[in-house]
Image (cartoon, helix red, strand yellow):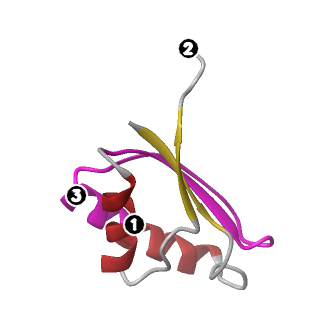
Amino acid sequence: MTYIDVHTSGLKGLTEEQFMDRARKTESEYKARDVELRELFFNLDEGKSFCICEASSPEPIREAHESAGLPIPDEVIPVKSID
């Protein structure tokens, strides 16, 4: 299933390099949990990020963030796309 995970806190004030380091940590944890990161969007001025992932449920997405030492997403929303 496809999910969007939403972060609205904990990112403001990070440099792009700091953010990308955190994203890489999370991605390696995703792989360990069979989560596929499809796309990542971010706006550090607003302190927000959005990841589009494929996973069996929201739990492995949340677990990956926690294991990487990062804030757990504010929301993990199941979504569909228009084909």
Q: On the image, which quarter does residue 45 sit in?
A: bottom right
Determine crowd level at label 3: few under 14, some 14-19, many 20+ residues with C-alpha closer than 10 A. some
Q: Nearer the viewer, residue 21 or 49?
A: 49
The residue at the point 72 percent across, 73 percent down is: 47
For residue 33, which numbered disc appears in the image?
3
Q: Position of residue 9 (x, y in %)?
A: 66, 78
Magenta segment: does it hold 41? yes
Q: Secondary structure at mark 3?
A: loop
Question: Amino acid under label 2?
Answer: Asp
Cα gap from disc 1 to disc 3, whole angstroms:
10 Å
Between the C-alphas of marks 3 and 2, the distance is 27 Å
Per the rendered image, the range of residues in magenta is 26-55
- Residue 73 x %, y %: 53, 68
Q: What is the quadrant of the N terminus in the image?
A: top left
Image disc number at residue 19:
none
Kind of residue at badge 1: Arg
Query: In the displayed image of the protein, which residue is found farthest to the top?
Result: 83
Instruction: Please name which of the two marks, 1 or 3, marks the residue nearer to the observer.
Output: 1
| Dot placed on the residue nearer the N-terminal end, 1 or 2 | 1
Give the SS element for disc 2.
loop
Q: Which residue is mark 1?
A: 62
- Residue visible at 28% across and 64% down in the picture: 28
Disc 1 element:
helix
Assess whether residue 4 is covered by the magenta stretch.
no
Give the mark nearest the N terminus, 3 or 2. 3
Q: Dot 2 corresponds to which residue?
A: 83
What amino acid is found at the position of numbered circle 3 in the picture?
Answer: Arg
Residue drawn at x 19%, y 61% is: 32
Dot 2, crowdedness within 10 Å: few (<14), some or many (≥20)?
A: few
Residue 60 in the image, given as x and y percentages of width and height: 30, 59
In the rendered view, does 25 fall on the left or right side of 47?
left
Residue 68, percent across and down? 34, 78
